[in-house]
Amino acid sequence: MILLDNHQILAAVQRSLQTHILPMLEDDFAKVQVASAMKALQEVCDRLADGDPCDRMNADLMAGARSIVVEHERGSPELCRRLEQLLSSMPENEDARDLNRALGEGLWQLVAAAHDDPAAKGLLKLLYDQALAVYSADGQYIAIEAIASLT
Amino acid sequence: MSQAPSGPAQRLEKALQSNAKSLRVQSIDSIERLTSGLSSQSYLVEAITADGPATWVMRVEPEFGVIPPYDITREYRLLEDVGRAGLPVPRMLHLGEDASVVGGRFLLMSFIEGEIYRSKDPRIEGDPDLCSSVQEQFVDMLARVHATEQQTLPIYASGPDAARAQVAVCRGRMKRTELIPSPVLRHALDLLEREAPEAQRIGLLHGDYRLPNLMWHEGRISAILDWELAFVGDPLSDLAFTQTVGMGPCSVEGPLADHYSRITGIEVHPKKIIYYKLLEMVKSTIIGLAGAHDLARGGTDLRLLSVATIALSGQAMFGALEGQLEAYLEAES
């Protein structure tokens, strides 16, 4: 296996499932499972090529939050001070999902504590935009067969 | 010493012969998994009884699931209740409490002949007469569900507390399933808690009322299926659910909502519908979170990956729905 890189191994598994397993299956539930597995393998292949999307989400959230500090530091000094504090307290070299937990919790505490503050509204919009971006990017990994079996 | 039966069909045969004597089971010939449904696992059971061949549907309480906590006993009792009240549902045949028989507690129910339409079904969309018949029966049956008396599900609250009770259930599920924080979801729950509307009436709600959960035979609804999300609350919650994404011609709005109002006397207030649409999107998002959570702790149904992904669409829509709701609130104040 050392001769092949991760992407080549996963692509071979995908081709095997597509060529040798899927056509042999008669059970509908098994077919849906294989179709879903192929989508999952595709997602892992893409992560190997492009990096973990959670890293990108964290970077986007940090950059967005920094822009909010710049934009609102005069109008919402207290919230911006706490936001800066949060950003500077984020651990480096942390696992992407651990960092996301810390960042998500921290941003949520700021939004929840100051509904009407313009900077909090900006943070909420940033979070909405992120939700939309994640959904748009993840849509390609939905196995249509899986959803069709449920609707 | 007699040997324990090994396969699920043999174990089920033995269990039914011992504990469901009225079914007069001689043998279980096959158990075939059905692909539809995500929560409980459903199987088609072919049996030979002293009265002849029989086909039944078996639903098994899963070890993992997207709408915990499961309670197959509750589902069994509710279906008995609503069946007695006259709603078309499968007849309950046996409640199996021994999880070792088929890998979870199970219920056995009658198999109902009929066809199922998808939410957007070309057979309906290409036939205007069929479409209006399906739409009218869809609404009439929903009104019947809402007026049905039952003893199984508790009435937690009325007035604005009816909606708050649902929000509390959502919060509990979110806490159990959130792998990474969902600030947008938490914000939506806070808004829903704050702005809970007064329920004009409290009734039995199906909780997942859509075309794929109805069976049709000779042009009439022959069964309402999948009651595991049923609860008691504001009927407008069920109506709003029909308006969420992908519901096709049976989205109860416009003339269909007017028809519902005429037969029930319940006013379909647009602000309340937006509120409950947001609540329904929150619920579906949490089902998606639960799908990911299930896989993380050992679940094996890979369809949950797609469910987790599609549930993100709910979060992507929160902003627009919250904006609409806030516009109503501002106009009122």
Image (spheres, rainbow, N blue to C red):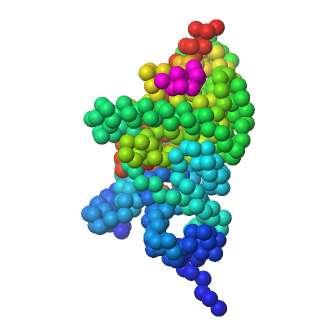
User: Quadrant of residue B106 in the image?
Assistant: bottom right
- Give the vertical position of B260 relative to A90 (above or below): above
For this rendering, which residue is in front, B138 or B41? B138
Question: Which residue is drawn at the image coordinates 64% and 8% (left, top)?
Answer: B333
User: Quadrant of residue B201 in the image?
Assistant: top right
Task: Check the image and name the residue furthest to the bottom.
Answer: B1
One can see residue B118 in this view: no
Q: Position of residue B142 (x, y in %)?
A: 52, 35
Horizontal side, residue B156 vs residue A40: left or right: right
Image quarter of the N terminus of chain B: bottom right
Question: Which residue is drawn at the image coordinates 61% and 48% (left, top)?
Answer: B84
Q: Position of residue B225 (x, y in %)?
A: 51, 48
For this rendering, which residue is in front, B314 or B103? B103
The part of the chain drawn in magenta is B259-267
- Give the vertical position of B120 relative to B71 (above or below): above
Question: Which residue is drawn at the image coordinates 41% and 32% (left, top)?
Answer: B135
Horizontal side, residue B265 vs residue A38: left or right: right
Q: Position of residue B323 (x, y in %)?
A: 53, 19
The main secondary structure of the magenta stretch is helix
For this rendering, which residue is in front, A72 or A122? A122
